[in-house]
Image (cartoon, helix red, strand yellow):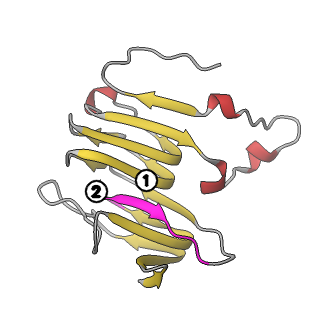
């Protein structure tokens, strides 16, 4: 951890691998100080099991250094059952979807990719705001003929009261 602008931040440099799960069903992972885990640098946290999260994950920028963060849950899901509004800045990958409590709201500012989508497990609300500056660009998206950036199509909300949505 380093201190930037008075905030303790996790310095990311490459891949941090966690064998097993981060947090547990009865005790979610919380930031060491406050309600937000701040990250800086370019890197990712890769977890082989589930991630039970009970805090925000946000960027804190070092002078003239861009932060790019990814949370990769390889074989499990992202579990957030604590009540409240939470934010994750960066790319989120889950193998088994996101599991939310009924009074939990999650805003992902970046991108979310999953292998298994189970809307019935998302009792709370999920909002995904695609932010290109907070994610790693794929090579396919940069292709001059097939890649397309249209900011109108990258905002999505998922909640139990939505049965369908339309994307322009």
The CA distance from mark 1 to mark 2 is 10 Å
Name which quarter of the figure residue 146 lies in: top right
Q: Are marks 1 and 2 in contact (CB under 8 Å)?
A: yes
* 82 over 102 or under it: above or below: below
Q: Does residue 135 appear anywhere in the picture?
A: no
Going 66% across and 54% down the picture, which residue do you hit? 133
Q: Does residue 19 appear anywhere in the picture?
A: yes
* Nearer the observer, 164 or 61: 61
Left or right of 135 in this view: 18: left
* Nearer the observer, 45 or 60: 60
- Residue reaching furthest to the left: 26
Going 75% across and 50% down the picture, which residue do you hit? 139
- Local secondary structure at mark 1: strand
| Residue that label 1 marks | 88
Left or right of 135 in this view: 99: left
Q: Earlier in the sequence, mark 1 or mark 2?
A: 2
- Please tell me how crowded label 1 is: few (under 14), some (14-19), or many (20+) other residues with Cα within 10 Å: many
Residue 156 placement (x, y as % from top left): 51, 30
* Nearer the observer, 74 or 69: 69
Chain part drawn in magenta:
48-62
Going 29% across and 55% down the picture, which residue do you hit? 50
Going 60% across and 55% down the picture, which residue do you hit? 134
Mark whose residue sits in front, 1 or 2 = 1
What secondary structure is the magenta-colored segment mainly?
A: loop
In the rendered image, which quarter contains the N terminus? bottom left
Residue 71 placement (x, y as % from top left): 45, 58
């Amino acid at each position: 951890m380093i201190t930037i602008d008075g905030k303790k931040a996790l310095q990311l440099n490459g891949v941090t691998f966690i064998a097993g799960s981060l947090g547990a069903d009865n005790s979610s992972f919380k930031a060491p100080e406050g309600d937000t885990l701040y990250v800086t640098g370019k890197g990712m946290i890769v977890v082989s099991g589930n991630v039970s999260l009970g805090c925000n994950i946000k960027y804190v920028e070092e002078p003239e250094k861009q932060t790019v963060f990814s949370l990769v849950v390889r074989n499990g899901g992202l579990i957030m059952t604590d009540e409240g509004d939470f934010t994750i800045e960066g790319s989120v990958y889950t193998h088994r979807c996101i599991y939310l409590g009924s009074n939990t709201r999650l805003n992902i500012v970046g991108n979310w990719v999953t292998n298994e989508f189970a809307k019935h497990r998302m009792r709370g609300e999920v909002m995904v705001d695609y932010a290109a500056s907070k994610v790693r660009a794929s090579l396919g998206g940069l292709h001059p003929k097939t890649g397309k950036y249209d900011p109108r199509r990258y905002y999505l909300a998922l909640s139990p009261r939505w049965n369908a949505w339309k994307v322009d």
